[in-house]
Image (cartoon, rainbow, N blue to C red):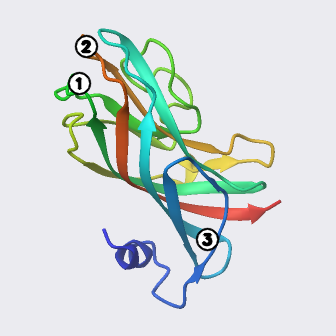
Amino acid sequence: MAFSSLIKWQGYGLGPRKRMALGTLGVGVTADHFTTDGHNIVTRLKVAGVMPAIVGGTNLGVGLLVYTFPAGVHSVKVARIDIALQQVDGNVTADTPKLGVGSVIATGAVTDLTGTAGFDDILTEQTMNDSDGTKEDKAIVMPTAGHIVNETAGVKAVHVNAADGWAASGDATLGVAGDVWLEWTYFGV
């Protein structure tokens, strides 16, 4: 979905757009922020990062910090991923992990992201087709009652998380490549 259709789809029209530099990016992430008023923002995170080593033959959750929202109050309204996991060693190629976006980094002996609060609270887990570069494209529009409202002292982190019962040989690193889109409102400090 192109940026202009995302903006149109949300009813903002295609008036003048301001580029902004908000928040802090994770390692291997670049971003574009688009807004017409400084409060309603669409952020495109372009991810080219690496998750921690995958221990072979284990149930394991791993994650990558991709963004930290700026100080203040914000509400996430829409999240979209167009992300691929890319194995390095060739050992987890056929694995089909669960992938989601959450405010808490995935860790521990888990095979999905739904059992631990925060592992997929921004975008619920999706089953990847493989861990060999096939992208997963999914958008979640949160109902008004389901918006994530983050108070001033709340958690500001955004992680791309994956969990699986990984193949026996594991993998030294698991690459993450693609885009995370967030539509959010900034209410100030």
Give how far across and how far down residue 100 sits, in percent.
41, 38
Res 186 → quadrant: bottom right
Q: Amino acid at mark 2?
A: Ser
Q: Amino acid at mark 3?
A: Asn
**Residue found at the far right of this picture:** 189
Give how far across and how far down residue 169 sits, in percent.
25, 13
Q: Which mark is residue 137?
A: none
Up the image or down, 96 lies above or below 181; here it is above
Res 109 → quadrant: top left
- Horizontally, residue 37 falls left or right of residue 102, namely right
Label 1 belongs to which residue?
92
**Residue at 68% across, 76% down:** 38
Q: Compare residues 52 and 34 and report the one nearer the observer.
A: 52
Q: CA distance from mark 3 to mark 1?
A: 40 Å
Q: The N terminus appears in which quarter of the rendering? A: bottom left
Asked if disc 1 and disc 2 are in contact, CB closer than 8 Å, the reply is yes
Label 3 belongs to which residue?
40
Q: Is residue 68 visible?
A: yes
**Residue at 45% across, 54% down:** 79
Tell me the crowding category of disc 2: few under 14, some 14 to 19, or many 20 or more residues within 10 angstroms, Cα based.
some
**Secondary element at image label 3:** strand
Q: Compare residues 10 and 152 and report the one nearer the observer.
A: 152
User: Closer to the N terminus: mark 1 or mark 2?
Assistant: 1
Q: CA distance from mark 2 to mark 3?
A: 45 Å
- Horizontally, residue 110 falls left or right of residue 26, namely left
**Residue at 16% across, 27% down:** 94
**Residue found at the far bottom of this picture:** 15
Tell me the crowding category of disc 3: few under 14, some 14 to 19, or many 20 or more residues within 10 angstroms, Cα based.
some
Number of numbered labels in the structure image: 3
Up the image or down, 155 lies above or below 72; here it is above
Label 2 belongs to which residue?
169
Q: Amino acid at mark 1?
A: Val
